[in-house]
Amino acid sequence: MRAISYMRYGGPDVLHVEEVPRPTAKEDEVLVRVKAVEATKGDCEMRSFSYAVKWFWLPLRIALGVRRPRRQILGMYFSGEIVSTGAAVTRFSPGDAVFGTAGFRMGAYAEYLAVPQRNTIITRPRNMEHADAAAVPLGGLNALHFMRRAAIRPGERVLINGAGGSIGLHALQIAKAMGADVTVVDHTIKEAALLRLGADRFIDYTRSDFAAEGQRYDVVFDMVPRSSYSDCIRILNPGGRYLCGNPRLSVMIRSLFTSWLTDKSASFAFATESMEELETLKQMIEDGEIRSIVDKIYPMDEAAAAHRRVETEQRLGAVVISIGD
Ligand SMILES: NC(=O)c1ccc[n+]([C@@H]2O[C@H](COP(=O)([O-])OP(=O)(O)OC[C@H]3O[C@@H](n4cnc5c(N)ncnc54)[C@H](OP(=O)(O)O)[C@@H]3O)[C@@H](O)[C@H]2O)c1
């Protein structure tokens, strides 16, 4: 089968397409014919081994491979079709259209992927094609996790910093579905699309500082690694919640003190993934409450260009690699 692989850490050009043996499904696994996979910021970080949050470095290097990548085929979030199932598989049959996550074993940058049936994989929403479906799990699962954690009540004021990214675009739609009044912060070029998706107000981070506008919020959801922690806490109403998707060590420590010593709370988390959460997203998609925004679809041979777009260019939504012909 054809797969996009990389043998060493480096720039996008370390990615290349090669022939590798096709996996087979073990007893509790399904074999998926992958049709589309999201190229994520996380994939780029693993490929280049460069992380904005430095405390990640050592544990991740040990986990991913000290000298060279231990797993040479990236790709966590996919859409595809079940080709065959192991003897113990009860949840799926050949021919099922599915989407979900390959987990930290990755491997979805390839024509075939063997994954345990217990992974967060479910049947695809009936109103979505493969590219749109592949764009759901990363942004959707993370956003749903954080928006539920924020326990948003109808009418509350929510600010999403970095709302034009994979996670932010879903967070905006989920917060709106929860009845929030949502202010979004991102680059100029994303204003029209974010307002179309339901944002109540847009703040352009290239022109103004959201913390200097004198507004107060019940929830601040922060996806931007280097934003000011004090500013985010200062603009919260009493009882307000700050959620950080990409915490520095100092933010993790300060969060504990904010929650102990003030009437505000701050939390950071690495979102979990569950079948129930993906089913909730599927239902919201089928009910028309949320939709995917795909920036661009690349063929397998242009995986390096896909990574370049994720890393260096202003994009709106998910970059997807179409797998196969
Ligand atoms: N906690 C978790 O479980 C978890 C899981 C997955 C990912 N993450 C982390 O969460 C972060 C967001 O992920 P993502 O996939 O949504 O990333 P993404 O798609 O790159 O989105 C980031 C967004 O923030 C915007 N941005 C950049 N600088 C900004 C600034 N100063 N102010 C406001 N907006 C700004 C970007 O716009 P531009 O186009 O202008 O750059 C982009 O629209 C990443 O750093 C990722 O590593 C956390």
Image (spheres, rainbow, N blue to C red):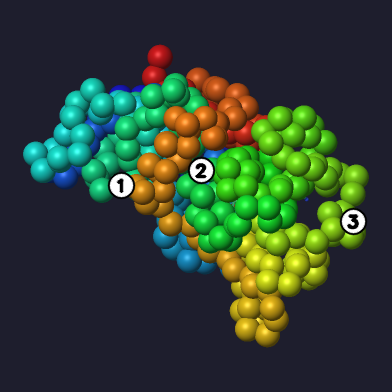
Q: Is residue 266 left or right of residue 136?
A: right
Q: Amino acid under label 3?
A: Glu
- Number of residues whose C-alpha sits closer than 10 Å to that of mark 2, classed few (under 14), some (14–19) or many (20 or more): many
Up the image or down, 250 lies above or below 317; here it is below
Nearer to us in this view, 26 or 49: 26
Q: Amino acid under label 2?
A: Gly
Q: Which residue is mark 3?
A: 213
Q: Residue at x 37, y 34 (%)?
A: 99
Q: Which residue is mark 1?
A: 119
SS state under label 2: helix
Q: Amino acid under label 1?
A: Asn
> Which image quarter: residue 202?
top right
Q: Which residue is mark 2?
A: 140
Q: Residue at x 39, y 19 (%)?
A: 324
> Which image quarter: residue 133?
top left
Q: Is residue 243 left or right of residue 121?
A: right
SS state under label 1: loop
Which comes sooner in the sequence, label 3 or label 1? 1
Up the image or down, 114 lies above or below 265; here it is above
| Pointers 2 and 1 in contact (C-beta within 8 Å) | no
For residue 1, say whether it is visible: yes
SS state under label 3: loop
